Image (cartoon, coloured by chain):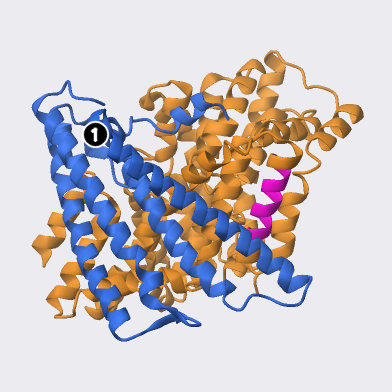
Amino acid sequence: MILTGLLLIALALLGAPLFAVIAAGAVLAFGRADIDQIAVVMEVYRIAETPVLLAIPLFTFAGFILGESRAPSRLVRLSDALLGWMPGGLAVIALVTCALFTAFTGASGVTIVAMGALLYPALKDAGYRENFSLGLVTTSGSLGLLFAPSLPLILYGIVAEVSVDRLFIAGILPGSLMVLALGLWSFREGRFLQRAAAEPQAFSMGEAWAAVRAAAWEIPLPFIVLGGVYTGFFAVSEAAAVTVVYVLVVEVLIYREITLTRLPAVMRESMVLVGGILVILGASLASTNAMIDAQVPARLFEFVTAHVSSKLTFLILLNLFLLVLGTMLDVFSALVIVVPLLLPLAAGYGIEPIHLGMIFLANMQIGYCTPPVGMNLFIASYRFDKPVVALYRATLPWLLILFACVLLITYWPWLSLALVQ
Amino acid sequence: MSSEDREARRPTRPAAQAFEGGGVLGRSLRFLGGIEDFVLVLLLAVMIGLAGWQIIARNLLDTAVIWGDPLLRVLVLWVGFFGAVAASRDDRQINVDVVTRVAEEPWRSRIRVLTDLFTAAVSGFLAWHAVRFVRDAEAFGETAFGSVPLWLTAIVLPLAFGLLCFRYLLLAGFHLRRSINPETGG
């Protein structure tokens, strides 16, 4: 059993698609327990029995349309008109717009490609240091992971069987903490920069109004999604349906930035991501079941509780484990494989599933930017034509700040739970 | 976003598509890919239309299509699996790519032959069990929702796993050729 496990891990490290590795694990485990392996397929079919999942293809497609349109530049213009007057304003704008955009596109790398392309040159023109600008656009690619309607947040709700609406609300404070902390760092950089060269632009009522008018159709979007879900008017999947229809009407029919002939390509592109995630989810439904049959979570629980006595120690170990995990796996695979194992453990130490979700995702957010496989690093390296090693250095201060936030989120449950209780 | 940006998000040239090449085989593969894409786009369009209609019907007309919600759930499965087939055609399944990123040719291709064959084997095995699942569902006359038979909604599983198996066999063949002769494609 250990041998086959190691073999599968070796295959995963060699680059075999994770869905195949996970499915193979389930097949072998069911075989060992003398359960007909048709069970694997039956588990996969459960995808068709999970209502919230509908939100994933719909939100993803809506995010891809937004990324494909000129919404990013309107968003940047709007924030520039509103926040450009303050020192470090542009950097703060970059953070806020990236966070918003990532929430809608699910940290799939679209943020770096679509927003980074606008913000990186703008930051450099405004006189920000190269490393500061690079670090900002790279780390911001996953900032906003904790804000509704981000894909990982929805997926956590499905895997952990926690209400997605409550997760949407729970993410507000921890997510804002991260934006705020990085914002202060940018503010400091801005003051430093002001002395050197550039002067902040004065606030212009005319430009602000023009920017609001340009983005008039997109400004209501967060309110439709968040307002609809927070007030309980829409279920999450309904909010997704409204979002996708709204975005289609706005970008295709009103702004006309995406032609009807272009639409099928965007649909396909977005569903490649969705397919990649769902097939892993399907396989992991089977592997989780196989693990429960083999009493893996129970044994893990016994083992950990025998060795780790206090909640504090557990949380420290959890943080370390998740940070390492985040460097190896993308957030989606990590979620579906590890969360079912962590839930009973966390419950044993009195950690709320919602709090666990915040800890998990906050850690994973850092994992996006840590070597060796941090996705943001590679996308940024490709997009801005910089060696990955240069990005390691550029992102370091940002990661340290995010790490401090992760510690706060981990050891101060109030932050995650205040709004949902 | 320009097409240049789109390329930036796709660092490696899709090997499976490079393999398609010319000739009868290439043409049939492109034809198959075209059908897959068409079905995928159609399914998503139906999903969006139906999901949108359900909300209008429920909130404004005070009715809703009864089979609408279960059908939407089945569509998620179908879209997901056709999306997964598309991901395989682009060679963009989610994986850990530390080793393949640093490995040099011909080792990169040799490793790929191994992992491609493994994935094909797993997909083929699942396709076979999915066929059994569909057959059982038909034999027992199980229904998915309303009077819609389960075998019909579940048939996407043998289909998609079969296509995944096929795609990874093609990829394995492509990487095998390239491990012998690095000049081949890609």
Identify the image quadrant of the N terminus of chain A: bottom left
Q: How many marks?
A: 1
Residue A137, given in percent of the width and then of the height, sits at 55, 32
Instruction: Tell me which residue sits at (26%, 34%) in the image.
Output: B26
Instruction: Tell me which residue sits at (56%, 61%) in the image.
Output: A55
Vertical relation: B35 (above or below) A30: above
Judging by the rendered image, the residue that carries numbered circle 1 is B24
- Mark 1, chain letter? B
- Is residue B115 left or right of B38 when viewed as pictured? left
Vertical relation: B177 (above or below) B37: above
The residue range painted magenta reads A241-251
Main secondary structure type of the part rendered in magenta: helix
| Disc 1 residue type (three-letter) | Val
- The letter of the orange chain is A
Q: Secondary structure at mark 1?
A: helix
Q: Quadrant of residue B19?
A: top left
Which residue reaches farthest top? A197
Q: Specify whether residue A249 is painted magenta.
A: yes
- Is residue A198 left or right of A208 when viewed as pictured? left
Residue A369, given in percent of the width and then of the height, sits at 43, 39
Vertical relation: B23 (above or below) B90: above
Q: Specify whether residue B100 is painted magenta.
A: no
Residue A403, given in percent of the width and then of the height, sits at 48, 47
Instruction: Tell me which residue sits at (16%, 56%) in the image.
Output: B121
